[in-house]
Image (tube, rainbow, N blue to C red):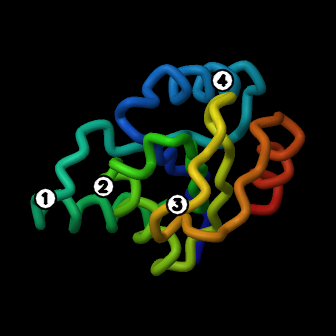
Amino acid sequence: MASTNKVFISFALRDIKAHDRLLEQLKKEQTTYSFVEMPIKQSWEPSWKEECRKVVTDCDGVIGLITKNVIRADGQQWELRCAYEGRVPVLLIHGDDDKLPAKLPEPVGQRDIDAWTWPIISTFLNRL
């Protein structure tokens, strides 16, 4: 698949402040990527799910901001499921200082969640 230089940002709506901080950081670092998202999460709508799958799988990678809010974030869970099913590279980063619940829902489940640091994000982006 040809590179699009697009990275999808997956986040729970309750984590909008963390999302904004991440975008600020990415802008400050002047990456060569553009960042896309589904700001309106309507996971109960089949048409939204279809559009979400298309947007996610058209990207070179996905960065998922993971916090305790992922448990109730059906839209974010769907976004990540689309990425994994579409074999899009995913970086999961811990979106805040709060401890994560012991049991996280699929598709996050037992996957590694990295610390939110620029070297980790930069390494991920450079591998896309």
Residue under the image location 24 percent in, 45 percent down: 41
- Furthest toward the right, the residue is 119
Within the image, what quadrant is residue 51 found in?
A: bottom left
Query: Which is nearer the eye, 88 or 67?
Result: 67
**Which numbered dot is residue 74?**
2
Q: Are marks 2 and 1 in contact (CB under 8 Å)?
A: yes
Marks 3 and 1, how far apart at CA: 21 Å
Percent position of residue 63, x then y:
60, 50
Within the image, what quadrant is residue 97 found in?
A: top right
**Viewer-side label of 2, 4:** 2
- Looking at marks 1 and 4 on the same chain, the residue that comes earlier in the sequence is marked by 4
Q: Secondary structure at mark 4?
A: helix
Judge left or right: residue 91 versus residue 101: right
Marks 1 and 4, how far apart at CA: 32 Å
- Looking at marks 2 and 4 on the same chain, the residue that comes earlier in the sequence is marked by 4
Q: Are marks 1 and 4 in contact (CB under 8 Å)?
A: no
Residue type, numbered disc 2: Asp
Query: Which is nearer the eye, 98 or 26?
Result: 98
**Viewer-side label of 3, 4:** 3
**Viewer-side label of 3, 2:** 3
Q: Secondary structure at mark 2?
A: helix
- Looking at marks 3 and 2 on the same chain, the residue that comes earlier in the sequence is marked by 2
Return the residue at label 4: 27
Q: Are marks 3 and 1 in contact (CB under 8 Å)?
A: no
Q: Residues within 10 Å of mark 1 (few under 14, many from 20)?
A: few
Marks 3 and 4, how far apart at CA: 30 Å
Q: Secondary structure at mark 1?
A: loop
Q: Residues within 10 Å of mark 3 (few under 14, many from 20)?
A: some
Residue type, numbered disc 1: Trp
